[in-house]
Image (spheres, helix red, strand yellow):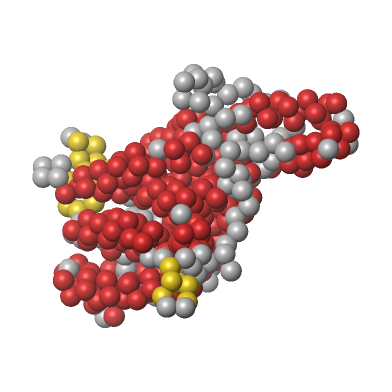
Amino acid sequence: MCHEAASTLLRPATLSTVATTAALRAPTTPSVVRRIPAWRRGAKPKRRAELGLLVISSVITVALYVVAEIGTKNKIPPHVGPILAVILVMALAGHLANRWLAPNANSVILPLAALLNGVGYVVIVRWTPPAAKLQATWAALGILCYIATLFIIHHSRDLDRYRYLLLLAAVVLLVLPLVPHLGKTVTGAKLWVGFGRIEFQPVEIAKILLVIFFASYFAQNKELLSIPTARIRDRLVLDPRPLVPILLFWAFSMGVIALEDDIGFAMLIFTGFVVLLWVTTGRWAYIVFSLVLFGVGAFVAAHLFPQVQGRVDLWLHAAPNTQLGEGFYALAHGGIAGSGLGTDPIAGNIYALTSDMIFVAIGDELGFIGAAAVVIAFVLLVGAGLRVAQAARSDFSRLVAVGLTATIGFQAFFIMAGVLRILPFSGATLPFVAYGGSSLVANYILIAILMRISDEGASSVTERAMGVSLPGETDFLVAP
């Protein structure tokens, strides 16, 4: 009856559209060879908005580049045209991929990422020109990986099917830097792996795989983790047994990262784990337990690992001649409006200026206004990611979107808070902004997964009226 009533309210053209959409969203089996996705005709208002925002972000990037070159060399660079063309081509490639593979996805995620990437590129050109060409190459590779991710992952539920394979891949990537003659130590952290001249940080990809695994495990065990089922005398309490396997793996991950002497990613993975656990269950008891666990772990790490102790000492006692102390002077020198792109030599003496301390370079020459603009861009990116999670059509997709959004948001917060001495300096890279190929490529893959979830969640009213749904689509309810 409901099906017939809904059918009578819809025009024949609408019914054919819904049928086509249902066919496109129909589940596939492993035995069926997947075809290349067809180009969906019709109006795509979100993509038009995205194209306009990408053009604006490209123009802002080129304008900043011209200002920096004028400030440094006192002349307009002769190659502004080719640079603008390259930036527009990269933006257009991502946009066309969205029109083809994710036509209904969020319209602001890619432009925000492109804007942050462009601002970071300008700062890198300003202070370390030799690294700028390599960063541009990594950005192009990131766009290619973005397109490949959208092309390969037809449905977010496919990731749920391979949770343990993804877990195995994450473990291998975490352990790789500890392999003799393969791992490399850079600035005290054993996070790098080298193959000849190629070096990368496998933990950047591992963090995405861990989020997907945590989301899959929590989505499967949501009721067991949130509904009291164990009895102690005359009271029902939460059964801790479903949490034991995930806690053991979390402890393993923390142990590996501790051996690699990096507190930034340890904090990031711990925070992502806690966020997903709380979003799944809504139980504040887990938050209290996690804070206690974090306090104990931080106390032990500060006494057992010299690098952690050194970071805490630097946080508490940042002398003027230290990295953080010099960063404070540079930020103070920038003031409200900044000293001007290409005109200030003060920040140039700071160690790792375009990687760990790039937020200082922005605050120095662009001032509080430029630094605030970067913060606002990250806030908007996190808001867009949470909006994607809100509209997701299955528990697993919602948790993946929340976990990936929390990962990029907290990573940005940790590094900016460390520069400002709100938290101990973690040394993590500022997503899309800081110099680093591994981080840039991984973050483009991250937002591609968000775009896939967003496209799935953007179903029309007519689809829902006809009952078109994805396998596993449910309302996300947290037990009271």
Task: Report the front residue among 42 and 257.
Answer: 257
Task: Report the front residue among 239 and 452.
Answer: 239
Q: Residue at x 58, y 38 (%)?
A: 471
Q: In the displayed structure, would residue 144 be above or below residue 295?
A: above
Q: Is residue 32 left or right of residue 294?
A: right
Q: Is residue 115 left or right of residue 247?
A: right
Q: Residue at x 46, y 25 (%)?
A: 30
Image coordinates of residue 352 in percent, x first then y, are: 29, 58
Q: Is residue 369 left or right of residue 436?
A: right
Image coordinates of residue 326 in percent, x first then y, are: 31, 71
Query: Which residue ends up furthest to the left in the rendered image?
Result: 180
Image coordinates of residue 429 in percent, x first then y, are: 36, 56
Is residue 170 in sight in this rendering?
A: yes
Q: Is residue 233 left or right of residue 479?
A: left
Is residue 131 in sight in this rendering?
A: no
Task: Report the front residue among 110 and 353.
Answer: 110
Query: Picture quarter containing residue 356?
Result: bottom left
Image coordinates of residue 121 in percent, x first then y, are: 43, 47
Count of numbered labels shown in the rendering: 0
Task: Report the front residue among 234 and 177.
Answer: 234
Q: Which quadrant of the figure contains the C terminus?
A: bottom right
Q: Which quadrant of the figure contains the N terminus?
A: top right
Q: Residue at x 42, y 51 (%)?
A: 217
Q: Residue at x 54, y 19 (%)?
A: 35
